[in-house]
Amino acid sequence: MLRYCYNPRGMTPSPRLLLTIDYEPWFALSRKHDFQSPESRCSLDEGTSRQALDPILEILGDHKTSFYLVGEMVGWYPELPEKILGAGHEVGFHCHIHRKLNSVKEIEKDLIASADWLKKYNVQGYRAPMVNTVEGVYPLLKKYGLTYSSSLYAPTGTVINKDGVLEIPVSTLPLQKRRSHFHAPRYMSPELLLLGEFPYGSSFTSGVFPRTVFRIIERALQSGKSPVIFLHPYEIVTPSRFTQRLTNDLFRNPLLYPFTLNKSNFLKNLLKHFPTSTMQDYIKELQ
Ligand SMILES: [Zn+2]
C-alpha cells in the first residue's frame, strides 16, 4: 500500500471546503429499522428525503458539493441523482441500505445491490456508513468501478492511495503530534480521541461546537489545506416531529442528539465565507 499525505503527486490544489452530504433517511440515526423490509423503510420515510432536496439545493446555490446517496433511496426516488447532477453537484455512494457493514462479504453484497445505478451515473466516490469500514473495502471499490473513498477520519489534508483507490478522509484536527496509522477502521471512537484528534468534520461536532468548527475550517483553509466535513439532509431540513419520533433512540443514546440539531445556519455561514468544490474536482487537481 502506498501512502501519501497532503498531496500524492506534489500538486497542491487551491484550498477549498470539501462539503459533503451523506444523503440518508431521517431514521438512519436509529438502528431499529436496519433489517426491516425495504417497503416499510420507504413508507417510514414518507417522502421526507425527496422533499428535502429542493430546499438544500437552493441553499447551496452555486456552491458545489458531493452528495453520497443511500442506494435504496435511488429506488424510492429515482429523480434524486438526476436533480443533484443537474444542479452541478457530484453523486457518490453511501451504501445501499444504511447499516453497519463490518465485513468484506457484506460490503460486496451491498455494492452489488446498487451496481446498476452506480454504473448508470458513473459514480466514483464512496462514503462508508458511519464513516466506519475495513481495509478490504478498497479492492472491492476498485472492482466495482469506484475510484475514491472518504471513509476514515484523519488529519486535514491527508490523502492516501490504497491499492489504486484514493482515500480522502473526513477531517480531524490533531491536538498533539503523534505518529499514527491510517488503516480502516478509523471512525469516531474513544480511541480516535485518545490519539489526540478532534473530529471536526463530523456533523456531531458541528452540532455541539459550530463556532469552533467554523474557526478550525477557516484556519485550515488559510494554511492551504482543504477540510472534508459532512452534513445530513435531516440536519439542513428538519423532518416533522423529528425528535419525537426518535425519542426512544435518544433516550437510549443521548449522543445522537447533536445529529438532530438544525445546521442550516451553520451551512449558510460556511457558504458565505468559504469556497467549495466537489471531491471529484478536488481529485482532478491532485492528479
Ligand atoms: Zn450515514
Image (tube, rainbow, N blue to C red):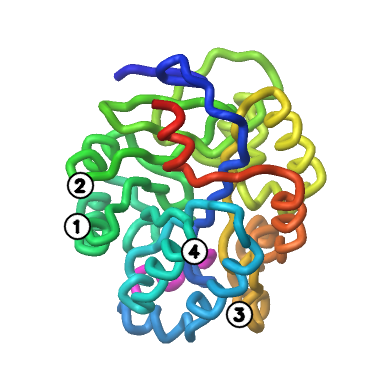
Q: Mark 1 and 2 residues: CB-CB less than 8 Å, in contact?
A: yes
Q: Residue at x 57, y 61 (%)?
A: 232
Amino acid type, residue under disc 2 in the picture: Tyr
Main SS, magenta residues: loop
In the rendered image, which quarter contains the C terminus? top left
- In 3D space, how far apart are the residues under numbered discs 4 and 3 (Cα atoms)? 32 Å
The image shows residue 208 at horizontal and vertical percentages of 75, 51
Relative to 54, residue 269 above or below: above
Dot 4 lies on which element?
loop
Magenta stretch, residue numbers: 29-36
Relative to 59, residue 158 above or below: above
Q: Is mark 4 within 8 Å of ligand 1?
A: no
Amino acid type, residue under disc 1 in the picture: Ile
Q: Nearer the viewer, mark 4 or mark 2?
A: 4
- Mark 2 — residue? 144
Q: Earlier in the sequence, mark 3 or mark 2?
A: 2
Badge 3: residue crowd in 10 Å (few <14, some 14–19, many ≥20): few
Badge 2: residue crowd in 10 Å (few <14, some 14–19, many ≥20): some
Q: Nearer the viewer, mark 3 or mark 2?
A: 2
- Mark 3 — residue? 245
